[in-house]
Amino acid sequence: MKIFSVDFVRPLLLFCSLLAIAGVTAHQITYSRSWHKPLDVVVYPINADSSLETHNYIKSLDDSSFVEIDDWLAKEAARHEVSISRPTHTRLGKEVKSVPPDLPTNGGVIRTVLWGLQLRYWVFRNTPDDASNLRRVRVFVAYQQGEDDKPLAHSVGLQQGLIGVVHAFGLPEQNAQNNIVIAHELLHTVGASDKYNFYGAPEFPIGYANPLRVPLYPQRYAEIMAGKIPTSSYSSYMATSLKSVRINDLTAQEIAWIED
């Protein structure tokens, strides 16, 4: 006699999986945002278009390729009077030979949750080790040569699992802007929210580096979670490097650098 039907067991297993993940996530959020010691950030490159050019680009990367991110975060932490001098330690991980599952473009809540589980399983399969993930962010960067006038896929950063998936250009001249995207998704994993509108323009006041500036325009810097420098209420342009990017007070609150 059947005690449990398949229709009952599957939802139960999904519920138990989500419950276990929620417990781990709660600990990750606590430890990753404590800022008592540097957060370990590992960048795993992926040759997303299987081209020789991208292969050669990845081979040119090393830890120094991402030190700009650590230096920038250290400068921003000092500006916000955070006690830790180096909030992050970013290093290059091994190349990953497969691509992560695609984010559903028109998926509902269930599809998005299932994608999140699928992504975490993919991460487990492709970066298996014994290191604790309570204070380690894994950023998977899918490098490619790209196509003219065609944007790359949307990058994502998940606080659940401390995982980032970045789509970037495998071109030396794009290094500085790639680091902006990596820093943006990294901050998502520790609680920062996007601060641009449906059209990609910075939202006022939350998406401005200095919403109290007089005169308001042009802004001198981009806010990291908006990515663009406003020149008027209807125009803005992309920041070219982290030198022209700031973390505003709201983002600093979200990542537990300053109190609400």
Image: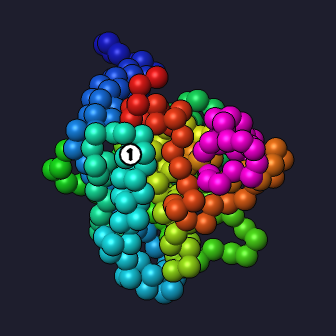
Residue lying at 37% horizontally and 82% vertically, measured from the top left: 59
Residue linked to disc 1: 77
| Percent of width and height locating residue 2 | 33, 15
- From what the image shows, is residue 102 above or below residue 29? below
| Percent of width and height locating residue 27 | 27, 29
Q: Residue furthest front?
A: 214
The overriding secondary structure of the stretch rendered in magenta is loop
> In the rendered view, does 169 fall on the left or right side of 134?
right
> Closer to the camera, 11 or 238?
238
Per the image, is 211 magenta? yes
| Percent of width and height locating residue 124 | 30, 50
Per the image, is 124 magenta? no
Quarter of the image for residue 96 reads bottom left
Residue lying at 22% horizontally and 44% vertically, measured from the top left: 37
Can residue 260 be seen from the camera position used here? yes
> In the rendered view, does 211 fall on the left or right side of 177?
right
Look at the image and tell me in which quarter the N terminus lies.
Answer: top left
- From what the image shows, is residue 87 above or below residue 9? below
- From what the image shows, is residue 243 above or below residue 228? below
| Percent of width and height locating residue 34 | 28, 34
**Highlighted magenta segment, given as a residue range:** 197-222
Can residue 97 be seen from the camera position used here? no
Q: What SS does tag 1 mark? A: helix
Q: Residue furthest right?
A: 234
> What residue type is disc 1 on?
Ala
> Closer to the camera, 16 or 59?
59
Q: How is the image coloured?
A: rainbow
> In the rendered view, does 23 fall on the left or right side of 98?
left
Quarter of the image for residue 20 reads top left
* Label 1 packing within 10 angstroms: few (<14), some (14-19), many (20+): many
> Closer to the camera, 76 or 196?
76
